[in-house]
Amino acid sequence: MTLRQRLARRLLRLVGWRTDGEPPTPHRFVLIAAPHTSNWDFPLMMLMAFETGLSIHWLGKESLFRGPMGWFLKRLGGVPVERTEPNRLVAQMADVFAEQDDFALVVPPEGTRSRSDHWKSGFYRIAHGADVPILCSYLDYSTKVGGFGPLITPTGDVRADMEPIRAFYADKHGRYPDQKSDIRLRDEAS
């Protein structure tokens, strides 16, 4: 275990959290980060990634990466995204996956920390477009445990692919449970 892993484990224990499981190898997948109801989700997710040795990448609006913080956020795995061309994002991420043997992209499907009647489908579209699996990960504030769940290969049948995801997240609770979004994609209605 590296120094960074030991430090991350100690910090997690200090705040009362523990990590359950290990991410699969190779680290080549889109990782769902849910439920996402608090700003505390990000530092906890980063500590759990450090503890398990998982090098993650995450998407952030381009404006976050301007100025002196930009270098630091990129070092933490941040990938700046221009929100004016959301349809181009899937193709861009598919290209990145095609060039990388080891790339784990974190996508919180709730998008924001406020309640919605559906999840955003970006995680699914990126995984399907890049031909990589989806890894379910979670932070359960009711047990103070975070970890990894099933690895799901998207088939294009959105409704069928979402069933095991819904089942996995059914008993996971965010910091603010009333902010948890419904676990369904708008694409499932079509």
Image (tube, grey):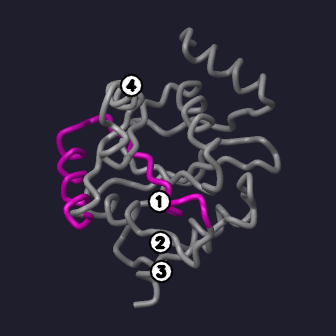
Q: Which mark is drawn over residue 159?
A: 3
Magenta region includes residue 112: yes
Element assignment for label 2:
helix
Q: Which residues are magenta?
A: 86-114
Element assignment for label 3:
helix
Sort mark 3 into few (<14), some (14-19) or many (20+) by Cα contacts within 10 Å: some
Residue drawn at x 29%, y 50% is: 81
What's the residue type where badge 3 is placed?
A: Arg
Name the residue that disc number 2 marks: 161
Residue drawn at x 38%, y 36% is: 26
Name the residue that disc number 4 marks: 72
CA distance for labels 1 and 3 = 13 Å
Disc with the residue nearer the chain's start (4 vs 2) = 4
Q: Which mark is drawn over residue 134?
A: none
Q: Quadrant of the N terminus?
A: top right
Sort mark 4 into few (<14), some (14-19) or many (20+) by Cα contacts within 10 Å: few
Quadrant assignment, res 163: bottom right
Q: Say if mark 4 contacts mark 3, CB within 8 Å.
A: no
Q: Is residue 33 above or below residue 52?
A: below
Element assignment for label 1:
strand
Q: Say if mark 2 contacts mark 1, CB within 8 Å.
A: yes
Percent coordinates x, y for residue 78 in the rendering: 37, 37
